[in-house]
Image (cartoon, rainbow, N blue to C red):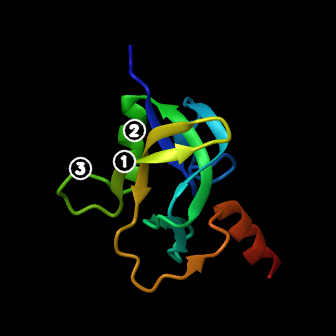
Amino acid sequence: MNQHILVFVYGTLLKGEPNHGYLTEAACLEEHCCTNGRLVDTGEGYPALIKDDYAAVKGELYAVTDSQLKNINRLEGYFGENRANLYERKTLNVYSDSQTYSAFVYLFENPGNLPYITENDWRAYQQKTADD
């Protein structure tokens, strides 16, 4: 039996977003949860999460299989530790109203001068930019 791995998603993997198909067979454990960090707009149609202990990013938590995780790794440009990765995969605490989980989160470590998404919520940001 495949062991399930917890993954926190905050951008194009969210329900209703373009890459959610990667998670269609995954179990959604929490639709409303958060982890420490800040979102930046990459300008490429997806956000990036950067480390920040004093802010919280909204997202969803999924239990995935090994094969689903491999596909997500490819999507996120993660090839393993000590490699040239687009995103680094770290284990962070993810908080819901009822409990704390330990889950994989994909972090962007070199944001440069990318603009912050002040809402720290990809859907809210997209709605706001669509309304502007």
Residue 72 in the image: above or below residue 4: below
Q: Tell me the SS state at disc 3.
A: loop
Q: How many marks?
A: 3
Q: Tell me the SS state at disc 2.
A: helix
- Image quarter (top left, top right, bottom left or bottom right) of the N terminus: top left
The answer to the question of whether label 3 and label 2 lie on touching residues, with beta carbons closer than 8 A, is no
The reply, left or right, for residue 121 in relation to residue 80 is right
In this view, the residue in front, 37 or 114, is: 37
State how far apart marks 1 and 2 are (Cα).
6 Å
Which amino acid, by three-letter code, is at mark 1?
Answer: Asn
The reply, left or right, for residue 123 in relation to residue 51 is right
- Image quarter (top left, top right, bottom left or bottom right) of the C terminus: bottom right
Q: Residues within 10 Å of mark 1 (few under 14, many from 20)?
A: some
Q: Which residue is mark 2?
A: 69
Identify the mark nearer the N-term, 3 or 1: 1
Identify the mark nearer the N-term, 3 or 2: 2
State how far apart marks 3 and 2 are (Cα).
12 Å
How far from the left and from the top, in percent, is residue 56?
Answer: 58, 61
The answer to the question of whether label 1 and label 2 lie on touching residues, with beta carbons closer than 8 A, is yes
Residue at image point 69% right, 49% down: 16
Residue at image point 56% right, 66% down: 55
The reply, left or right, for residue 88 in relation to residue 60 is left
Q: Which mark is residue 73?
A: 1
Q: Tell me the SS state at disc 1.
A: helix
Q: Residues within 10 Å of mark 3 (few under 14, many from 20)?
A: few
How far from the left and from the top, in percent, is residue 115?
Answer: 54, 82
Which amino acid, by three-letter code, is at mark 2?
Answer: Leu
Quarter of the figure with residue 103 = top left
Q: Residues within 10 Å of mark 2 (few under 14, many from 20)?
A: some
Residue at image point 23% right, 49% down: 80
In this view, the residue in front, 32 or 78, is: 32
Q: Which mark is residue 80?
A: 3
